[in-house]
Image (cartoon, rainbow, N blue to C red):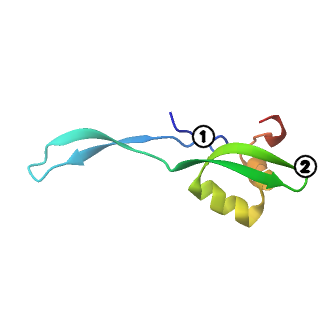
């Protein structure tokens, strides 16, 4: 199952609703990408499965600061 290693985001379940109001189950998938990210503080690359929203925030804040918000130790991944 697709899951972000930092935030823990995964699929949500919902309903398709037809014109006649018949509801059938569906999945709302998260956009999880496998990426190799450079961490200048550690002077090495780290491979992570993260959502595209996580990627945008990491570009803004930095990987270690973002992981610290969620209580994830990136050095052990």
* Count of numbered badges drawn on the protein: 2
Please identify the residue farthest to the bottom as the structure is shown.
60
In this view, 36 is above or below 8: below
Could you classify mark 2 by the number of other residues whose Cα lies within 10 Å: few (under 14), some (14-19), or many (20 or more)?
few
Residue identified by numbered label 1: 8
Nearest the viewer among 71 and 26 is 26
Residue identified by numbered label 2: 42
Left or right? Give the position of 57 relative to 39.
left
Q: Residue at x 45, y 41 (%)?
A: 11
Q: Residue at x 71, y 64 (%)?
A: 59
Q: Residue at x 30, y 41 (%)?
A: 26
Per the model, the C-alpha gap separating discs 1 and 2 is 23 Å
Q: Residue at x 13, y 48 (%)?
A: 21
- Label 2: which secondary element: loop
- Label 1: which secondary element: loop
Could you classify mark 1 by the number of other residues whose Cα lies within 10 Å: few (under 14), some (14-19), or many (20 or more)?
few
Q: Earlier in the sequence, mark 1 or mark 2?
A: 1
Q: Nearer the viewer, mark 1 or mark 2?
A: 2
Left or right? Give the position of 61 relative to 19.
right
């Amino acid at each position: 199952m697709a899951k972000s290693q930092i935030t823990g985001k995964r699929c949500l379940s919902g309903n398709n609703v037809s014109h006649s109001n018949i509801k059938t189950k569906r999945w709302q998938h998260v956009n999880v990408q496998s990426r190799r990210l450079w961490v200048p503080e550690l002077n090495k690359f780290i491979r992570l499965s993260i959502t595209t929203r996580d990627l945008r925030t990491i570009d803004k804040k930095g990987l270690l600061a973002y992981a610290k918000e969620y209580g994830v130790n990136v050095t052990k991944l």
